[in-house]
Amino acid sequence: MTTTTTTVWKRTCNHGEAKWPKCPCPWYLKQFKWGGKVYDPNLSRYARVVLDEELTTKTRAEAVGELVRTAIREGTYTSAKQQKNAQPEPSSAPGQTISALIKAFDKATIAADVEKRDTTKDGDRGCLARFAAFIPPKRKQPLGDWPIEQLSIDDVIAFRTSAPMRALQGSSWNKYRDLIVGLLRFAKAEGACARDVFADADEKRQSLLGRGKSNRRTQRVSEDLEARLLAAAGRAFGELTATRLQAIIVAAIETGMRRGELLALLWRDVNWDGGYIIVRAEEVGASKTGTQRKVPLSERLRDELLALRTDPTGAQFGAASYVFGNAIGEKLTTIRKAWHTAVLRAHGHAVEWTKTGGLSPACSAQLDRIDLHFHDLRHEAGCRWLESKHFNLEEIRQMYGHTTVAQTAHYLHAEASSALSAMQRYDAARRRQRDEAQRATGTTNQTETGLATSKTTAKRQQRQNASAGPRLVKGRKC
């Protein structure tokens, strides 16, 4: 399991780390090496110039830092200085570039949306940044450098059919589509472009940019696979790391919590007497819903957590320490390497890591074929609850933190199967009720076959009795 501390700091601050949250000194990204180059930008300046916001908390600085790291990995990162020099100030005048239009759209639409969380807004900005960085076939400049009037629907289609976009799930493409359509509509409304590139296109081209269907995963984690994952977690690492990886796998299956929610779990959030865990939905990576909820603590998970309760010195972790943190209770931001190692070994594959920290091409191909995500443990938890018939969809909805029961049913593919299961339970209950009534009256209990036979015999006798009477016929029979 990878041990990771905070990725941001106040490099030029003389006030001391304890005063960082309140002092006005700028936040910096700790040195991040990628592609042979070292990055350590001033995040406060980046947020002010690129995101049009001021960093006031360490939590927000870490979120912006992760946004910068992602952009660096994807090759779309532009420093605050470069962005300031390259892009004109937002205006609605005709002739502005797509990058300038995106900045104006961000300020007027994305940043102004009070209902969206900051992490969601960052995701929207990332989508538009990838659109602006796209270079259509037979072109030399990325879309962001073009005047908006030069953009055609065919350029948008080329973006949609590019390899990275084709690989997206339907729901992921829908986010890009909605943002791009909103941007084009904004361009016309603000007078930056005389036409709405999407709305003015013919139906055939619009259909090529249609909304994608959400592909729901159906991957299950059998008890045998679960046992192999736990065994692989124990073989692959040292005792302390193995114990925590095994515990987080059990926790995901027992609670249905997301990976980010588990990594953000503090010891103060575990209520031993009440028998539940509080999911606060506050920290970066654990705030998808933004709504706090309680998740029951099973006996199996209680035993796993008790084994993690003490640090290497034998002392109990403090209330502010992370349950699935490192050896001294600090937060881990990822378990990617540990999880991939356990998955590969659980399926009988040796694991090879490159010097840069990535999987070897052969191992990466094996991992793709296995197609097992950590999030599949959350899905498996709900499937097991539903199949046990000890939980109904409303109870599972509360544990998942979903907004509606319909969302939970869709997530668990329960729309059709739940009705079938309900009818089977209904029939079984009626049979039990009938049998109990027959025993109470002293009558002979008949099997389902016997009941069907007696009903058929009675109907046949009725038809015979009816045929024995006089028949009215027309004319005379010879």
Image (cartoon, helix red, strand yellow):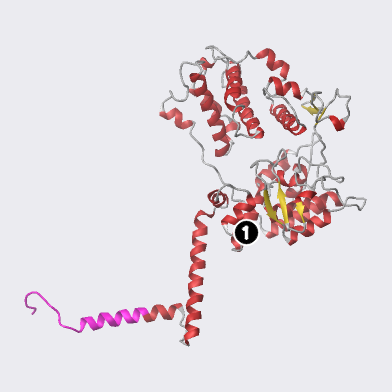
Residue 432 colored magenta? no
In which image quadrant can residue 358 be found?
Answer: top right
- Say which of 329 and 319 sits in front: 319
Magenta-highlighted residues: 455-478
Residue, far left: 475
Q: Is residue 233 visible?
A: yes
Tell me what residue is drawn at x 70 percent, y 59 percent. Answer: 224
> Image quadrant of residue 119?
top right
Three-letter code for the amino acid on which mark 1 is drawn:
Trp
In the picture, the quarter occupied by the N terminus is top right
Determine the secondary structure under disc 1.
helix
The residue nearer to you, when weighing 203 against 269, is 269
Q: Position of residue 144 (x, y in %)?
A: 60, 19
Q: In this rendering, is residue 282 above or below 295?
A: above
In the picture, measured across the screen, residue 170 lies left or right of residue 475, that is right
What is the x, y in percent for residue 107? 61, 23
- Quadrant placement of the C terminus: bottom left
Left or right of 272 on screen, residue 96: left
Residue 401 screen position, x and y as percent: 63, 48
Q: Which residue is mark 1?
A: 385
The residue depicted at 60 percent of the width and 60 percent of the height is 391
> Looking at the picture, does residue 174 appear above or below residue 145?
below
Query: What residue sits 64% from the left and 14% below the top?
Result: 87
